[in-house]
Image (cartoon, rainbow, N blue to C red):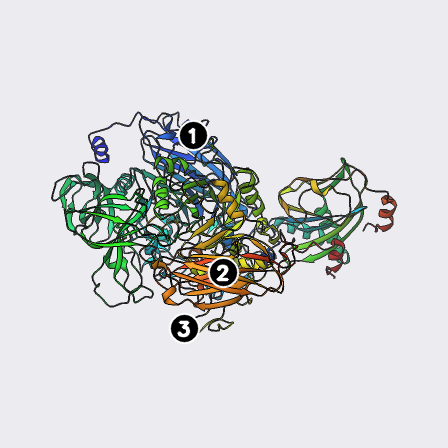
Amino acid sequence: MSLPIPARLLVMATGLAVWLTTPPAWGHDFPSMRTVVVQVERCELAVMVGFRPATGEATSATFARVASQPKSKGLETLRDVMTNTALAPVAFLVDGKPLVPTSVHAKLGLEPGGARPMVVVLVTYALPAGNRLVIRSADTKATSFSWTDRASHRIVLADAPTQGHWYNGVASMLLPLETSPGDSPCAASSLRSSRSLP
Amino acid sequence: MRALALLALLVGCNTSNTQARAQRIGSLEETIGGPHAIGTIGDYLLENDQIRLIVSKEGVGRVNTSYGGSLVDADLQRPGANGAKATGNDQLAELLPGFAFTVIDPTAVKVTADGSNGQYAEVTVEGGGGDLLQMVYLLNTGLVFPESLTFSNAYRLAPGKKYVEIRSTVKNTGKGAHPFPYLDPTQLKDLGFDIPNIENIQLSVPMGQLPLLGGEQTLFTPGQAGFNVRFAIEDTYVKAGGFPAFPGMVVDYVASRGVGVSYGLTVPDEGAKNYVNAYKDGYAAQAKTITPYSMLMPFTYAGVSAVYVAKPPALLMPGEEFTYTTYFIVGSGDVGSVLDTIYELRGTPTGTFGGRVVDAQTSAPITNASVVVLDAQGNPIDQLDVDDQGSFLGHLAAGAYSYRVLSDERLTTAAQPLTITAGQASGVFVQMDPPATLAVAVLDEQSRHAPVKVQLIGEYPAPSGAGTLPCQDKQCLDPRDFLYSLTLGERKRPTAFDGSKRFIEKAWWTKDGRLEAQVRPGTYDLVISRGPEYEVTTVKVDLRPGAFVAQNLTLTRAFPTDGWIAGDFHIHAQPSTDSGLPIDQRVISCAAEGLEVAVSTDHNFITDYAPVISASGLDPWMLGLPGMEMTTFEMGHFIGYPLKIDAGSTRGGEFEWSGVPPKTIFDQLRNKLAVEPGKGLVHIAHPRQPVLGYWAQFYIDAATGEPYPPTGILGIFAPYGDEFAPDKYANDFDTVELLTGRRLEDAHSFVAPTPLPPGPFPDPQPVAGTVVVGKDGRPQFPGVVETWMTMLDRGAKPTGMGASDSHQLLGDEPGYARTMLFVGSGKDVPGGFGRADVVDAITHHHAITTNGPFLEMTVGSHIIGDTVVASSGGVDVDLHVRAPTWAAVDHLIVYSNSVVILDEPIPPAQATNYARQVHLALPADAWIVAEVYGSGNMFPVLTPTEFPPLDATVIIKALSAGLDLSSLPIAASLKPKFTHYSRPYAITNPIWFDTDGNGFTPPRPPLPRVAPPATSRPDVRQQFDALPELTP
């Protein structure tokens, strides 16, 4: 059974959140968890990825890599490692061509109790013209997708999966694109709004 | 016949050359057949020379629970059943393993041994964990944490055996050790269980089986319960020893009794795995003898029981498995045939107990007798049916017993001693006192042999002992203790529940007013009735043992109902898993209660009464419409009609209810399954009933008619699935039940009595005479009528209906409540109306909900359901209520736009015929509804609610024993009385008034057809910017 995030029940969601952020007790094994929220805008995809490594060896390995760095670089290294791990299995393709990030920003956090690091990454992609936008994850088990359209007029909403719904255990999701997205100069716009890579 | 079969076995029937086999079903001819047969192509058949079983394929559940992979059909082998479907006798609803409240969400069902090597055959179900109830999701997560586990269930059938061995396995697929319970109590608190004292308890994880043995089967457990399982379990709650032992009843085995087939559950001696033995200190107060085979029954609810047998290890290491074994037994109809197999399994030395039961006057065999064997303490431990020669035979372990013999129309015999010696036979000859014979012929006011109900009303002698009648508190006298014995398997005999000593000895529903029956001797009132449109006819009869008494009687019409027909749009029969009532008895009972339309609404089964109505000769009296109650496990019950019958389906049609939102359910009932796509009516059943009601489960605010997020512990126990999101709530149903059965307490929001009973009460403090509200300010027990009126205020127009939800007969009669529908003047005669007239009357709201009174409301030539163009000066509304004397009314209330505009008593002299005019001022568009009440007891036409109805919250209460759940409505000390006699009630649908000629404009903003989606997701850039960052 997956762990759906019940949008309807604030209390339930809070309970789950408390549980998920509870320091793992002895004998408890929490898997890695990645949430991907894809926000489709007129010229860009703004994607927020939240990630926590699995308890146990995975977390230990992450900390071990950081520990090998000078102390002053510790957080930066942890952020890079976590960001790369968070983004690695996730890909976005338009008509089969992978999109390249135009900006990546990450913020680190720690679970209450400090047992596991967490990272939230905001990554943007220019959204070219095309027929099909595919969101893909190579880590199906640990990844939950959700998508939302911000009046982009780029997605054929009638044929798209439900917005705001969490899709668990899904390897890929297809969002059909409008064939005529309009005449705005998206490429220039997206370049202007992009931020530097870390 | 069973006796003969056993005899054959004793003389050396050799089964060594038999074979078991397992296969996937490729043809319906390979299925079992029978009242609850659901097996179909693609399922898995497991059979040997003794029994046949079907395990359903993976996917969604097709019976009652959410998932496939369960054992859905079971029967004995029936020789000659080639193309067995027509001749099978499956009565099992469903059996599935329960790992606490985790069930298997199957990913694969497969034949793991086909039996071709002469050994066992086996079908195995594999999968992940699913929730039996989303409502207990958090508890389940805390106890089991199924995410890092896989589950399997292997059904293994050996040649020659009447039982299947079920090996249920849980495997840790995680990387770490998996504790049971998964979380400790303090973590449960963090999980959201903000329940006082939870951190101080130790929990355990019971595992076992969840049997749904079917409505035809009567549960039996040896010991204090006997056939009184439900109440006996509830009695053990007060003796609960506390956690880690879960509350419930300890039993040595579980069996059932049915016609031609019975079922049983037991376990092998698995030592430390046994759950009850692991926590035996917790059960010391109730279980005199805990054996290696003890099992725990924490609840039995609506045909669903739990039988917990095993305790998993405290820690399951990565890759490690835990397996426990249960035996599921198929018997020949009585408990004894199940117990015989249990003795065989346990290797218990036995002797035989046989005999013959005859009438003391005629020496004729008594063919419906039941022989109940009692232990030294007088508790039932076995039950044996007699065959068509009055003979019985069974096995018993060596020891001293006694036995009693029951037959429905005779007095139960006194206990007689019995000694059994291993390897020896004991025989008895039983003579029972003769019954009386009663013959009745009834004519209606047109001298027709009309369908009628015939009842014998007795008066019991004053019972000994202190106490009060009726039974409404712990000091009461309970008719179960002195009038009949549920423990022995006697029928309930409903009492008047009004302080008198009247009770119903027996009732018959006749198709033509003719009856000849044997009855228990006594002096009775013979009462004839035919629904609310007739008075009751009563004569006194003295029925002596062996005597024959005949009566010719006539019915008297109470009032005319030109143009109106009576319908019940929510009734069950044998195809429902929780009703064992044959369809012919169901349709006869409907006609005898004066119904003219009967809609079959079996649980997840589309039934057509028409062929049976025709075969019973009831065509002139009643129209049958096929329908179904789409029964979700916890979203509510949704009825659709008229539906078409899919002859190729083993459940009358193919549909889906698990995990889908209401819209999908509505679409299926309205389109896919309907006789005329697009014209199926969607009917909401008992909307406010916890767990089973749509409005209860979606938390519909009575004041707004829209969903609200529950808070506190209600939120914890709320279903979590996407299908329960507020924006999934749909209000485009066609009809809703305003009164279901006898549950008049659900009609209106619960008002605190005046004066208040002694407190203390949780905050907010109740105020006498006002609606009791919870912490969130909403009614703690919201009424159906208030919510419906809110919908009317907001422009929705669901037709209010009355329905019985009847599953049985006596004590659960069809037609109470009912819906009166106007089909046109002169058309309410046999053949005068058809399906289209019924649908048309409902869609135009020409309907009255009633359990007796006939309440008409008119404005000139306009009737209930019409929209009247009226001037702003107002209108005069005519009200006319008529009732039979047994349903006299005394109180009239009139509402307009949810406001009471008239509330007055009805003079006693006009209690059966009262008319008055009400002037309604119309400053704007408005609707008007009228409602009447009576205070009298409608017994014996309508029986009381003597025992509180069991609902699913009992499960939660049982599992939460020792915890403070005072904030739950179910635990509130101030709540409606669920036990009461039945009193008259009727409510109309509205007449709408359009004052400006532009159609009806509702007084409040229209209700959105679909609730708006939950708050839209915020911009991810803003969300990201708002996040704090970890700094050195």
Disc 2 designates what residue? B878
**Residue B113 shows which numbered tag?**
1
Q: Position of residue A107 (x, y in %)?
A: 74, 56
Q: CA distance from mark 2 to mark 3?
A: 40 Å
| Label 2 Cα neighbours within 10 Å, binned few <14 / some 14-19 / many ≥20 | some
Tag 2 subunit:
B
Q: CA distance from mark 3 to mark 1?
A: 64 Å
Front position in the image: B502 or B153: B502
Q: Is residue A90 left or right of residue B177?
A: right
Residue depth check, mark 1 versus mark 2: number of the one nearer the observer? 2
Residues packed near mark 3 inside 10 Å, few (<14), some (14 to 19) or many (20 plus): few
Which residue type carries mark 1? Answer: Ala
Q: Amino acid at mark 2?
A: Asp
Residue B955 rendering spot, x and y as whole percentages: 43, 55
Frontmost of labels 3 and 1 is: 3
Image: B1004 above or below B756:
above
Secondary structure under tag 2 reads strand
**Cα gap from disc 1 to disc 2, whole angstroms:** 74 Å
Marks 2 and 3 on same chain: yes
Numbered marks: total: 3
Which chain does the residue under circle 1 lie in?
Answer: B
**What mark, if any, has residue B961 been given in the picture?**
none
Residue B274 visible in the current orientation: yes
Indicate which disc, 2 or 3, sits on the residue closer to the N terminus.
3
**Residue A12 % position (x, y):** 57, 57
Residues at badges 2 and 3 in contact (C-beta under 8 Å)?
no
Residue A176 against residue B928 in the figure, above or below:
above
> Viewer-proximal residue, A64 or B773?
B773
**Contact check, label 1 and label 2, Cβ < 8 Å:** no
